[in-house]
Image (cartoon, rainbow, N blue to C red):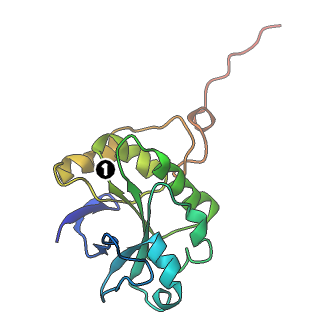
Amino acid sequence: MRDIIKDKAVVPDDWTLLKLAEGESPESMSIPAGKIIVPLTVWEAQRGSLLQRSDVGVWIASHERPEVLKADVTKLPVIAVDFPKFSDGRGFSIAYNLRARLGYTGELRAIGDVLRDQMFYMQRMGFNAFVTRPDRNIHDALKSLSDFSEAYQTAIDQKLPLYRRVVREQKATQE
């Protein structure tokens, strides 16, 4: 069992991520018992039977739309968003849409090419769990979640920009 970062702590990962094998169809994929995260295409193809389980999550590829899950976000304990390479930022938009527009409140997990340098910003967009690359130090990555004490911009974690949160002294105007 590998470790992940969840809610700013290193914890064992008790979920298994399934991927379609070459030539396998979403309709025919066998879903084993236990905590499983299935591809979105499998969720769409087997939604009826998978909705009966409370131990199934979904992972979204960077080219897929989270709005497909609109009716199901309250039923999913975990949604993972794949970052196929560190330069692909579509996962940030997917996370924002899941949290802000679809109201998802469960575990939002970043998977794929998850690097320390981006985790602070991923957290700001709503991710609360991170599966770091195996060749990276997970404890070093954990430190990145507190790299900055303040953020200027608004995000999921802070609705007001810094200039609206800081009270400044008003200079007296002379007439």
Would residue 1 be found to the left or right of residue 55 on screen? left
Circle 1 residue: 113
In this view of the protein, which residue sits in the foreground, 66 or 12?
A: 66
Res. 76 visible in picture: no
Q: Tell me where residue 131 appears, x and y as whole percent.
A: 29, 59
User: Dot 1, how many residues are within 10 Å of its Cα: few (below 14), some (14-19), or many (20+)?
Assistant: some
Image quadrant in which you'd find residue 35 = bottom left
Q: Tell me where residue 38 appears, x and y as whole percent.
A: 39, 75
In this view of the protein, which residue sits in the foreground, 154 or 168?
A: 154
Picture layout, residue 140 above or below residue 8 = above
Residue, far right: 175
Q: Tell me where residue 16 appears, x and y as whole percent.
A: 28, 75
In this view of the protein, which residue sits in the foreground, 169 or 30?
A: 30
Quarter of the figure that contains the C terminus: top right
Residue occupying image coordinates x 41% and y 77%: 25
Q: What residue type is labelled 1?
A: Asp
Quarter of the figure that contains the N terminus: bottom left
Q: Tell me where residue 77 appears, x and y as whole percent.
A: 44, 76
Res. 69 visible in picture: yes
